[in-house]
Image (cartoon, rainbow, N blue to C red):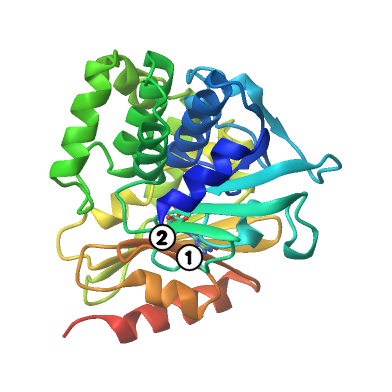
C-alpha cells in the first residue's frame, strides 16, 4: 500500500483515534505521540488511547499525559490509526468487528504484521517512528522539538541505543535530523537509563540470580514471577530490557524470558542473528522481528519451559 493513500485520508479527515500495542515501549509511545502532536498541530482532533499506561520511564515525553487508558471506546472517529502493532488483538481494546471509524490505518514495521488495516503502511523500517516521520514530512508539518524528541526516543530505544542489527545509515541520519530539530541526546539517555528505581535493581538481582543456560551454552533464559514484583518493590515495567543479559553471554544464540502475566506466560525471544525468532513466535501465535519476538502461552511453568526450550533447540544452527 502506498503512503499516498494514507496521506490523502489523513488530509481529508478531521477526527482521529491513535493507538498502539499493549505494554507499550519506546517506539510505541514515541511514534504515537509524535503523530498525535503533529496532527494536532495542523488542527486535527486527536485522541490517543492505549490499553496499558505509559511506562514511568517514558513519562518525560511531551504530552504523554494526553494518553488515556481505555477498555472500550464509545465514541466514533473519522479514522483509527494503529502504530507499531503487528496484529489488531495486540491493541487490546479494539475488535475487528467493531472499529469505531470508517477506516483503519495500520502503520507498522513488523514483518509478521497481519495487514489488518483498511490501509496498511507496513515496511521493514527501523522503527514505527521512521514511518511516522515520513508521514509527517510528506504532510509538510514542521518538526517541532516536541515531535523530534518523541521520534528520537523511539528510534534510540528500538535500536538499543544504536547497537542492534536494525541500525543503519538511515537510522543515524534520522537521529542527526532530530538533534538538528532540537533534541539533546544526553537528556534522553538520562531519562531512559539513569532513572532506575531501587525496586528495578533489586528485581534485576533476583532475576539474574536464577539465570540458566542450556548444556550446550546456546540458549539462556530468565524467569520473572509476579511475586517478585512485591518482594522487590518493582513493577512489570521494570522488566524492560532484562532479556539482554542472557542474550549477552558469549556463545548464546537465543535468549528467552519467561514472564508470568495474569496466570499466563508472556515469552520474549531474542536472537543473536543466526535464528529467526519471529518464525518461532508465529508458530506459537505471536510475532515480531527476526531478532526480537514474543508470544503468550498458558500452562504450568515447567511445561511451558519444556515446550519453548525444546522448540528453540530445534532451530539452533549446528
Ligand atoms: P518483547 O519481547 O519486547 O515483548 O517484543 C519483541 C518484539 O516482538 C516486539 O517487536 C513486539 O512487538 C513483538 N511481539 C512480542 N509479543 C508479541 C505477540 O504476542 N504478538 C505479536 N504479534 N508480536 C509480539
Q: Quadrant of residue 269?
A: bottom left
Is 181 placed left or right of 238 in the picture?
left
Residue corresponding to mark 1: 113
Q: Position of residue 277 (x, y in %)?
A: 35, 70
Judge by depth and name the residue closer to the eye, 259 or 162.
162
Q: Residue at 38% of width from left, 66% of height from top?
A: 111
Query: What is the crowding at mark 2: few (fewer than 14 residues within 10 Å), some, or many (at least 20)?
Result: many
Is 4 placed left or right of 255 in the picture?
right
Looking at the figure, which quarter contains the C terminus?
A: bottom left
Residue corresponding to mark 2: 110
Q: Secondary structure at mark 2?
A: loop
In whole angstroms, how far apart are the C-alphas of marks 1 and 2? Answer: 5 Å
Q: Are marks 1 and 2 in contact (CB under 8 Å)?
A: yes
Query: What is the crowding at mark 1: few (fewer than 14 residues within 10 Å), some, or many (at least 20)?
Result: many
140 relative to 305, above or below: above
Q: Quadrant of residue 266?
A: bottom right
Residue furthest to the right in view is 74
Q: Position of residue 203 (x, y in %)?
A: 48, 38
Q: Is mark 2 within 8 Å of ligand 1?
A: yes
Q: Secondary structure at mark 1?
A: loop
Q: Is mark 1 within 8 Å of ligand 1?
A: yes
57 relative to 247, above or below: above
Q: Residue at 60% of width from left, 61% of height from top?
A: 118
Q: Residue at 17% of width from left, 35% of height from top?
A: 172
Amino acid at each position: 500500500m502506498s503512503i499516498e493513500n494514507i496521506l490523502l485520508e489523513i488530509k481529508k479527515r478531521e477526527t482521529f483515534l491513535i493507538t498502539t500495542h499493549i505494554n507499550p515501549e519506546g517506539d510505541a509511545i514515541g511514534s504515537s505521540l509524535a503523530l498525535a502532536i503533529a496532527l494536532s498541530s495542523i488542527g486535527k482532533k486527536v485522541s490517543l488511547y492505549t490499553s496499558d499506561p505509559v511506562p514511568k520511564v517514558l513519562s518525560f515525553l511531551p504530552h504523554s499525559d494526553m494518553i488515556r487508558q481505555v477498555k472500550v471506546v464509545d465514541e466514533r472517529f473519522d479514522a483509527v490509526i494503529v502504530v507499531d502493532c503487528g496484529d489488531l488483538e495486540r491493541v487490546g481494546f479494539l475488535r475487528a468487528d467493531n472499529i469505531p471509524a470508517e477506516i483503519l490505518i495500520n502503520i507498522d514495521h513488523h514483518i509478521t504484521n497481519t495487514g489488518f488495516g483498511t490501509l496498511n503502511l507496513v515496511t521493514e523500517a527501523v522503527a514505527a517512528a521512521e514511518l511516522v516521520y515520513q508521514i509527517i514530512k510528506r504532510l509538510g508539518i514542521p518538526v517541532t522539538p516536541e515531535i523530534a524528541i518523541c521520534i528520537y526516543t523511539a528510534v534510540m530505544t528500538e535500536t538499543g541505543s544504536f547497537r542492534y542489527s536494525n541500525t543503519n545509515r538511515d537510522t543515524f541520519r534520522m537521529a542527526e535530523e532530530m538533534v538538528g530539530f532540537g533534541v539533546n541526546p544526553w537528556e534522553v539517555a538520562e531519562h531512559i537509563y539513569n532513572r532506575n528505581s531501587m525496586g528495578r535493581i533489586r528485581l534485576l538481582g533476583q532475576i539474574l540470580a536464577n539465570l540458566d543456560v542450556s548444556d550446550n551454552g546456546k540458549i539462556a533464559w530468565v524467569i520473572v514471577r509476579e511475586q517478585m514484583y512485591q518482594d522487590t518493590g518493582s513493577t512489570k515495567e521494570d522488566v524492560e530490557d532484562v532479556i539482554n543479559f542472557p542474550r549477552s553471554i558469549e556463545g548464546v544464540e537465543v535468549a528467552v524470558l519467561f514472564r508470568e502475566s495474569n496466570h499466563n506466560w508472556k515469552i520474549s525471544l531474542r536472537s543473536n542473528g543466526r535464528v529467526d525468532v519471529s518464525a518461532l513466535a508465529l508458530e506459537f501465535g505471536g510475532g515480531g522481528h527476526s531478532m526480537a519476538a514474543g508470544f503468550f502461552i498458558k500452562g504450568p511453568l515447567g511445561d511451558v519451559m519444556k515446550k519453548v526450550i525444546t522448540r528453540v533447540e530445534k532451530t539452533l544452527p549446528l
